[in-house]
Image: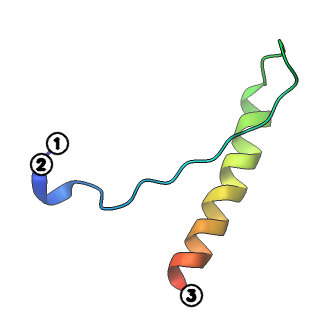
Amino acid sequence: MHAELAPCQIFSTVIPSQPGRMLSLEECLRPLHAFYLEKKAELNA
């Protein structure tokens, strides 16, 4: 990665699931998209 393109902030969230159960792609993407929209709104505020 080029130094001038390095990220200046890293965001993370926990996507909860029941113990021993693997989430489907859609079950992972829905909360990830909601998290993205939340952070985008915070950054644009």
Please indicate whether residue 39 sits to the left or right of residue 16 in the image: left
Mark 3 neighbour class, 10 Å CA radius: few under 14, some 14 to 19, many 20 or more: few
At 65% from the left edge and 65% from the top edge, which residue is drawn?
Answer: 37
Say which mark, if any, is on residue 45: 3
- The foreground one among 35 and 25 is 35
For this orientation, the residue located farthest to the right is: 18
Quadrant hosting residue 39: bottom right
Instruction: Determine whether label 1 and label 2 are within 8 Å by CB.
Output: yes
The alpha-carbon separation of the residues under discs 3 and 1 comes to 29 Å
Instruction: Determine whether label 3 and label 1 are within 8 Å by CB.
Output: no
Please name the amino acid that badge 2 sits on. His
The alpha-carbon separation of the residues under discs 1 and 2 comes to 4 Å
Instruction: Determine whether label 2 and label 3 are within 8 Å by CB.
Output: no
Q: Is residue 11 above or below residue 41?
A: above
Place of residue 11 in the rendered image (x, y in percent of width and height, measured from the top left) = 50, 54
At 66% from the left edge and 67% from the top edge, which residue is drawn?
Answer: 38
Place of residue 8 in the rendered image (x, y in percent of width and height, measured from the top left) = 30, 61
At 12% from the left edge and 48% from the top edge, which residue is drawn?
Answer: 2
Q: Quadrant of the N terminus?
A: top left
At 70% from the left edge and 41% from the top edge, which residue is drawn?
Answer: 29
Label 2 belongs to which residue? 2
Quadrant hosting residue 34: bottom right
Please name the amino acid that badge 3 sits on. Ala
Label 1 belongs to which residue? 1
